[in-house]
Amino acid sequence: MQIASSTVAALSGLSIEKMKGAGSGIKENRREHKKQVIRLALERRKPNADDPIDVLEKGGGLEICGMTGAMLASAANRTPTLVDGFIASTAALAASKISNNVKDYMIMAHCSVEPGHSTILELLGKEPLLDFQMKLGEGSGAAVAFPILQSAVLMLKEMAAIESAQLAGQI
């Protein structure tokens, strides 16, 4: 979470306080320590907020960098991406800074309780499909959202029009 928080802070110019929540339920003194570590990392590495590649290079972490690339590749292939949680949304924000068009292919699964997640959703101009106050991680929001998307696609694809269902004139 620290890597995601520092990456979002660097990409957005927003304070660490807007990013860092209790996460896994840590006490306030530990949370303050984590904020200090993030501030120090940003001061030492000095990522350029106008260059998302520089931000990723100086602190994005392998997981966030990989997801950023996957989201860009999906958009290039006109394939939607179901984005889950704070860390994946951090990659989505980075991808959107590299190419604004990538946002058109993002579906936000849910909004987690991590304060930085709602900030990212705002920055992306996206609404999540679900908001169950989840804080589990590991793709849990996407796992819940996927069947909803699947049902919506099937309904659009397979639902008969009034004319073809032989209901014309009966309604």
Image (cartoon, rainbow, N blue to C red):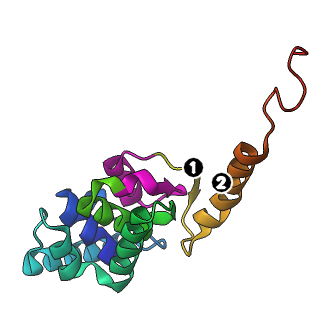
- Tell me the magenta residue range: 102-126
Q: Is residue 112 magenta?
A: yes
Q: Is residue 68 left or right of residue 42?
A: right
Percent position of residue 114, x then y: 43, 61
Rendered view: 156 above or below 91? above
Of the two numbered discs 1 and 2 on the same chain, state the one appearing first in sequence. Answer: 1
Q: Which amino acid lies under the numbered mark 2 shown in the image of this protein?
A: Leu
Q: Residue at x 29, y 54 (%)?
A: 100
Q: Nearer the viewer, residue 152 or 121?
A: 152
Q: Quadrant of the N terminus?
A: bottom left
Q: Position of residue 115 (x, y in %)?
A: 39, 57
Residue furthest out toward the bottom: 62
**Residue 170 falls in image quadrant:** top right
Residue 30 visible to the viewer: no
- In the picture of the structure, the residue carrying the numbered disc 1 is 129
User: In the image shown, does 122 or 31 lie closer to the viewer?
Assistant: 122
Residue appearing at x 37%, y 45% in the figure: 125
Please say if the residues under marks 1 and 2 sit with CB atoms less than 8 Å apart. yes
Which element is circle 2 on?
helix
Residue 91 included in the magenta stretch of the image? no
Label 2, on which residue? 149
**Taking the image as drawn, is residue 165 in sight?**
yes
Q: Is residue 118 left or right of residue 166?
A: left
Q: Amino acid at mark 1?
A: Leu
Mark whose residue sits in front, 1 or 2: 2
Secondary structure found at label 1: loop
As measured in the structure, the alpha-carbon distance from the residue carrying label 1 to the one carrying label 2 is 9 Å
**Residue 33's spot in the image, x, y percent?**
26, 77
Q: How many marks?
A: 2
Residue drawn where x is 44% and y is 65% of the image: 77
Return the x and y of residue 163 as percentages of the image width and height: 82, 26
- Choose between 95 and 1: the one closer to the eye: 95
